[in-house]
Amino acid sequence: MNSTANERTVDEHDVDPVAAALSLLLDAHRDDTSGALADYIPELATVDPDGFGIALTSVHGRTAHAGDARTPFTIQSVSKPFVYALAACELGIDEVARHVGFEPSGEPFNAISLDAATGRPANPLINAGAIVTSALVGGGDAEERFDRVRAFLSACAGRDLDVDEAVYASEDATGDRNRALAHLARSAGVLRQPVDDATEVYFRQCSLVVTTEDLSVMAATLANGGVNPVTEATVMSERVATVTLAIMTTCGMYDHSGAWMARVGLPAKSGVGGGIVAVNPSQFGIGVYSPRLDEYGNSIRGSDVLQSLSERFELHVFDHPDRPRSPIVRADDHTGEHGDELTLVVRGELDLISAEEVVAFLREWAATRTAGTIHVDASGVSRVREVARRLLTATIERLRATGFAVTIDGTV
Ligand code: GLU
């Protein structure tokens, strides 16, 4: 090496390797100008078609970005999973499910997709389902209900989001198909508000202005079990975040959702404004933006960048980890003055499989002895799932009943 530390530029010291990798991904797809802007909402056709940005926020709350990550655009259908989460927080998952289903429709976003028997839209991520879902939020007039929507999406993004009034006016002026969907849902008894109120809130929610950075924080909030990792605010329950991700997994990319999960393997939601959110549960959220769309209404470069990212960084949610993680960090086995003694140090989160590992270890150790002392050091355990608690308690009781002395540090 010829260069010394003193000769390096400030930039070299400052380079964020994640941002650098994101930037290379954008470069690989930058020249693809295929696809077209959405123009059925005329105002959407006025944006710069070349805008291209990406941001990734980890569950630790750090964001890396590249390209036009701060370019504003309207959120459009990317709002739908978040409004679903809001309705599920307010009414409960089961009550929302009485109005809108969980099944992929396999049809375009604006399809007339209502169940023949129940009148329910197939899922909350197609337009019919999204209109029904946002009409479940709040109890007051359209203004009160939209305020709730805006406040919730802002909490997910970690900053106050505003409406693009020109896009809203444009959606309202050309929204006859959405009104038709709302009328059908209303006549089937699943739309809780008058049609004009319901579509007003829905058009406003689609016209909220975001950046890819906002989308990455919103996605990271879902990845992080409903806690915004930047502001640390609890925005939704863990259960609602899980169910929202499940719906994104099966229905997020319109009638392209199956191929998307096979190839990219990240729960996602796209919007005709050119934005996409993608989530790797427990790890990170991503926002991408590029407004030229394919025939399904998904951003072309946005989808391709996510596919490259998933392949190059090995991010498919169903990828297999190197080896199962064990909660046992140390096992000391010795003979003391009171006979055989075992000290077992366990750490991390105890769920079904990690508790089963601990239980199997204890049972094996006890199987070759008639008595002894077991000390379980669980002081480094971060969380104990109910199923793990039951397995461990039953095993410890059984060991005590058969002549072993068991002490526990911390709670299991
Ligand atoms: N506001 C748009 C509509 O309802 C959203 C569609 C989308 O992003 O897929 O037509």
Image (cartoon, rainbow, N blue to C red):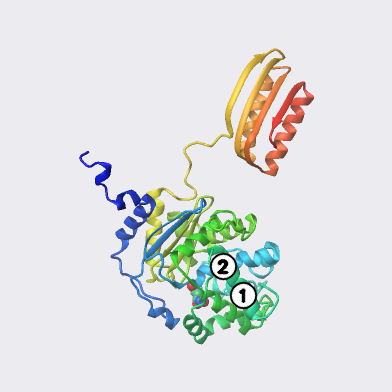
Mark 1 touching mark 2, by CB under 8 A? no
Q: Amino acid at mark 2?
A: Leu
Residue 177 lies, in percent from the top left, at 53, 82
Mark 1 vs mark 2: which is more N-terminal? 1
Residue, disc 2 = 153
In front: 322, or 75? Answer: 75
Residue sticking out furthest to the right = 401
Position of 63 with respect to 387 (left or right) is left
Disc 1 C-beta below 8 A from ligand 1: no
The disc at residue 147 is: 1
Residue 23 visible in this rendered orientation of the protein:
yes
In front: 168, or 269? Answer: 168
**Label 2, residues with CA under 10 Å away: few <14, some 14-19, many ≥20:** many
Residue 115 visible in this rendered orientation of the protein:
no
Disc 2 C-beta below 8 A from ligand 1: no
Q: Secondary structure at mark 1?
A: helix
Residue sticking out furthest to the bottom = 173
